[in-house]
Structures are given as C-alpha cells and as structure tokens.
Image: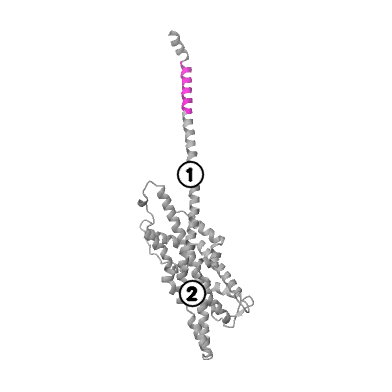
Amino acid sequence: MDFVRGFWRKHRRKVLVTAGCLGSGYLLYKLYNSHTRKLADLERELAHQRENDEFIKNQMKAHFENIQLIVDSTTLPHAMQYLSIRISEDIDVSDVMERLDKGKGMLSSSEKLQLWDELKILSFTRMVLSLWSVILLSLYIRVQVNILGRHLYVDTARALGSSHLLEELDLIDRNDEQKYLSSADFLVTNAMPGLISDMQDAVREVLKGKQLKDVITTTVLQETVMRVMDVFMSTGSPHHWVDYLMMPQDISGSSDEAMSKFQQLMVETREVLISTEFTDIVEISLKCFTDALVEEMETQTVAGGLVTGKPLAKVLPQIEKTMHVITAEPSKNRFLQLIKDMPEVKLFFTLLYANMPQ
C-alpha cells in the first residue's frame, strides 16, 4: 500500500496526463464516429434527393408531353372551328363576287372598279386576319395550357409531399380552371369586330394605290402580307394586340394574396404575352406561316404562276380561298404543324413549362 501511495506521488502528473490523453482520444473517436455517421446519412439523403429530382424531372417531361397532346387533340380543334365560322360570317366576300358576276355588261366602269376595290380589301383582310388569328390563338392556347398544366402538376406534387390534406391546400379551383381555359374564346366572341376593323385599316394603308393590273409575284405577295402585319402590330400602344386575345384585368393595387387563382393565372399569361421572348416567337411564326402559305398558293396556280407574276385581279380569287386552308383543323393544318415543330417554338414552351412557380 505504501508502495502504491509512493508510486502515485512520484508519477501522479504522468498518470493524469496519460489519462487525459486517453480521455481526449476517446472523445475525439466518439466525435469522429458521430461525424462519419452524419456524413453517411447526408450522402444517403442526397442520393435519395437526386433520385427524387430525377423522378420529378421524368414525371414533368411526361406531363408536359401529355399537355401538348391535349392542346392538339381537344383545345385547338374546337378553337379553330369556332374561329373559321366567325371569320366566314363576318368577312363575307360572296356578295361582292356575286354582284360582279351578275353585273357583267350592266355595271359602269366606276361601279365595277368600286366593287373590285372592295373585293381587294376584303380578300386581303380575310387572308391576313385568318393568318394572324390562327397563329396568335394557337400560341395563346399553348401558353394557357402549359401555364395551367405546370401549376396543377406542381400544386399536386406539393400536396402529395405534404402532411396537409389535399383539400386544405390552395389548389386551383375547378371553376377557376374552366373560366381560365374558356377565356381563349375572347378573341372570337368579343374582340373580332375591333380586330376586323383595325386589320382592314392596315390593309387599306398597305394596298393604297395598288391597281388591279399590277403584277403580283411570290415575293411581292409575301412582302405585302408582312407589311400589313407590321402596320397592324405597330399601330397603337405597345402590345395593344394582346387585348384582342384576352380581356384586360383590373388588378391595380391588388396583392397576390388578394387575387383569385383565375386572376393570378391571367396576370401570369399576360406577362408571358408581352415578353420579348413571346413577341420574337410571334414574329418568327408569322413569317414562317406566310412563306409556307405563299409557296402553297404557287404550287396550286395553274396558268401563269406567281413566280413569274400575275395581275392582282387574277390573284384575288386565290387569296379569297386561302381562309379555309389557313383555318383547317390542326390535324390537317400543315402550317400549324410547321410552327409547332420549329426549334424556337419548342424551346419557348419547354422553358415556359419548366419555369416552376416559387
């Protein structure tokens, strides 16, 4: 016992230091072990998150493709049929053509000239307005359906990943959804008279001074149509043409919380429509459609093609007939298919759909 006490007095400092080192080493081991476990848990969590992200990405891709099919098979055919009927009724050239036909040998030169001038304005207005309406309405509906589809998908995904019940979350009400989609009819049901009037003014401006004997070639026709589009799009306030597609929403002073889902969707849609990216897509689409349409007219011309040129009077009957080709149902409308397949258009709608709400 004395030996132990002596040993303790003599070596106490060394023993304490050694014990301290051993204790610290054990503590460090415990900390390291805990940190290693946390790292392993974190790696597992990140791997799971990566799998989940990949799953969501694949789900969104499948949902996006399904949305495009809905547009092509259901929404667009209804809109195009409604649009075609309305344009035929509101810009009817048959009366003028009938008066010209029945008045052969009976009309004075000034009367004939007046009727031909009326036919010229109506035919070009009908063609350009059909072209503009089909392109803008088809793009607008795609914007709508992609925005709605994205919101529905994200809201549902959040609901499934939440402890809250689905009905407790702020999802899009079915009435708001239907109201939003039916707003695509605004062009045909409300805006058509104003659109016809303004498009007719643009046609008169561009065709002013054009005589019936003037030679019309493929190039001249393409340039004339695009000039009418440019005059129409640039007349008035910037983006004034958006008001033909959707009713202006009075949301001044309203916060996001105060707005209904329908209003939020409409605000988001308008923001897309007045964006530089959408304006670029519209311009590219108008040019593509116009070029393809004029080429189609050239292939269907029998005697004396548009390449070499024909008098305007002989081109007018052809121009008048283009409306039914332009407004053909989407499954048979090669012009709409051309626009849909354009890389710029595909990219625009892919990015629009992928633009996840915060």
Which circle marks residue 49 in the picture?
1
Residue 231 can be seen, yes or no? no
In the image, residue 341 sits, relative to residue 295, either above or below, namely: above
Furthest residue to the top? 2
Badge 1 marks a residue whose secondary structure is: helix
Q: Name the residue under label 2.
A: 199
- In the drawing, does residue 316 fall left or right of residue 30? right
Amino acid marked by disc 2: Met
Q: The N terminus is located in which quarter?
A: top left
Q: Residue at x 52, y 59 (%)?
A: 348
Q: Residue at point 44% right, 73% down?
A: 192
Q: Position of residue 292 (x, y in %)?
A: 58, 69
Looking at the image, can residue 261 be seen?
Answer: yes
Q: Where is residue 289 in the image (x, y as percent from the top left)?
A: 55, 68
Q: Quadrant of residue 226?
A: bottom right
Q: At 46% across and 32% down in the image, what residue appears? A: 34
Q: Give the range drawn in magenta.
A: 12-29
Answer above or below: position of 29 versus 313: above
Question: Which disc, if any, is residue 18?
Answer: none
The vertical placement of 326 against 147, above or below, is below
| Circle count | 2
| Amino acid at dot 1 | Gln
Q: Earlier in the sequence, mark 2 or mark 1?
A: 1
| Residue 142 among those drawn in magenta | no
Dot 1: few (<14), some (14–19), or many (≥20) neighbours within 10 Å?
Answer: few
Residue 139: x, y in percent? Answer: 49, 64
User: Is 17 inside the magenta-drawn segment?
Assistant: yes
Please name the predominant secondary structure of the magenta segment in the image: helix
Residue 214: image location, x then y, percent = 59, 81
- Comparing marks 2 and 1, which lies closer to the viewer? 1
